[in-house]
Image: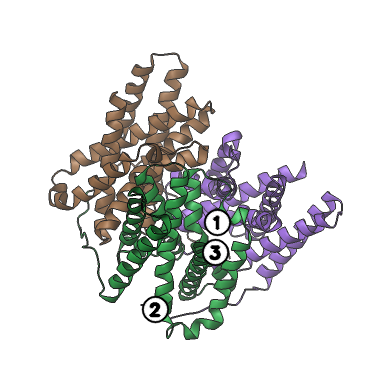
Chain colours: A purple, B green, C brown
Amino acid sequence: MLLHVLYLVAIVAEAMTAALAAGRRRMDWVGVCLLGSVTALGGGSCRDVLLGRYPLSWVENPALLGVTAVAAMATIPLARFMYSLRRLFLLLDAVGLVVFTVIGCNIAMAMGLSVPVAIMSGMITGCVGGVLRDVLCNDVPLLFRSELYASVSVLTGGAYIGGQAMALPHDAVLFAAMGFGLTLRLLALRFNWNMPRFIYTQDLH
Amino acid sequence: MLLHVLYLVAIVAEAMTAALAAGRRRMDWVGVCLLGSVTALGGGSCRDVLLGRYPLSWVENPALLGVTAVAAMATIPLARFMYSLRRLFLLLDAVGLVVFTVIGCNIAMAMGLSVPVAIMSGMITGCVGGVLRDVLCNDVPLLFRSELYASVSVLTGGAYIGGQAMALPHDAVLFAAMGFGLTLRLLALRFNWNMPRFIYTQDLH
Amino acid sequence: MLLHVLYLVAIVAEAMTAALAAGRRRMDWVGVCLLGSVTALGGGSCRDVLLGRYPLSWVENPALLGVTAVAAMATIPLARFMYSLRRLFLLLDAVGLVVFTVIGCNIAMAMGLSVPVAIMSGMITGCVGGVLRDVLCNDVPLLFRSELYASVSVLTGGAYIGGQAMALPHDAVLFAAMGFGLTLRLLALRFNWNMPRFIYTQDLH
């Protein structure tokens, strides 16, 4: 199934971007593997823990640990080519975001949860991995600051669930929602779209 | 029920203080909503995950996600008045702490858990939201450094559970414990009470 | 049972090193207790939450909370002697790593999980407490940067599980794996062994 292939592409892309973040923090090879796996599998794991859905994906299918660790390690020799491949990379990262999102929505709906929870489930699946990566690298999560990442996830999830509610065929809705989210994300990157910021400088104490 | 109303006041107050923290980090509007929701609902979610109590509150009642996101967004236009309202705010935040604490104790006792675990459950409910907020803002958690926040929670939980063990009427114990905790917290703020610090400067390696 | 005694030594050692980290961040006494307990019990708690294994150890046996809090507090008056005791300390910390690792492997195997998941379970039990400590102290986790800590855990777990697969007597395998891991860790500390680092300085955006 195409979604399964896209899922593998997504976790590989997430593991590789996490490996580059590890390299920026001068981590050792073990740190690269661990950060890659935590980033790629952390969103889905967080979703499953919050929804009480056991076993987690990597417990059921431990090959995922190998895939993410190998993808992270492979980034080390490939790093010199990363800059010239950065457009491909940002594309794969955006594919990952929308694929994770629809998978997360799907899982919550299969559990019979409500629409807002399904949208949250999609957003957690798509975004929490990157938050864990940034916290472990001692950065303020990018998610909270830029580029419509979370917004794209919420809108993709909303389109996917809304389309199904209108009784349209599932696969058409799936690809339309993913295409919509992907387009939005790439436009946001291309034109540097951002949400307005809230800037506050006082201290209440 | 009064406790339910106070719970809503508490999550609104927590979401609003988190929104101000987001503003200090120049987060965008989505970051403000996310940080507000994570802070307000994170303590209870962490407690439920640690105790294995499913579904989580916001999964069962997704309106809570809306309440916290709206409270966080509403903070943006209100921010200019926050400084003059800071006493009201610190009062609401203190109310939140004691309300979260007694709710957390209650839940653990209803699960038949032991007294120390019930006190921990109260402290986790009352304090973990703020820890998540500080970690996501890339700060050392305030909880670990100041103002008897965790101590007030432990003492409130102890008073609440101790009073019940003495077979006093539940509502009287509830309000006495909350009044005691609230008074202690406000006195700590007013007179700048702090626990002694541990200062260590050597490195073992 | 010896493993149980070693487990208590391990959580005491972890709580005490966390207390020193708290002192470096000038935390107050409550922060010292909390950071000590979170560090000592966080690895096992994270493992149990990820594997869906309830109740957690400190919920079932709340005395563990007392042990870790007391160990952390006792570090404050003892801190002046820590430097002269640092070799004992690093030894106890290394004992803690291998003990936590074999306990984590054991638990996963008793749940019937696969070998890679059991090795991960050992590594999570051995290493996540220190990651939580570093994140709460606003540091990049040491685990990702130095001293074969995670590698020792993986190799110890692999030796322990591999030895059992060869149908060797359990206790012989247990002590051989722990001795192997302990030796490796102490050699790594003594000779300052490190994994190679990945250093990357470009930004993809």
What percent of the width, then of the height, locates residue C86? 18, 44
Q: The numbered mark 1 sits on a residue in which chain?
A: A
Say what secondary structure mark 2 lies in. loop
Residue corresponding to mark 1 = A130
The mark nearer the N terminus, 1 or 2, is: 1
Distance of label 3 from label 2 (alpha carbons) = 20 Å
- On the image, which quarter does residue C44 sit in? top left
Residue at image x 71%, y 58%? Answer: A157
Distance of label 1 from label 2 (alpha carbons) = 30 Å
Residue corresponding to mark 3 = B37
What percent of the width, then of the height, locates residue C198? 45, 50
Q: Amino acid at mark 1?
A: Gly
**In the image, C68: left or right of A85?**
left
Residue at image x 35%, y 37%? Answer: C61
| Badge 3 and badge 2 in a common chain | no
Query: Callout 2 environment at 10 Å: few (<14), some (14 to 19), or many (20+)?
Result: some
What percent of the width, then of the height, locates residue C90? 24, 41
- In the image, residue A64 above or below residue C171: below
Front residue of C137/C15: it is C15
Distance of label 3 from label 1 (alpha carbons) = 18 Å
Residue corresponding to mark 2 = A204
Q: Amino acid at mark 2?
A: Leu
- In the image, residue A177 above or below residue C167: below
Front residue of A186/B9: it is B9
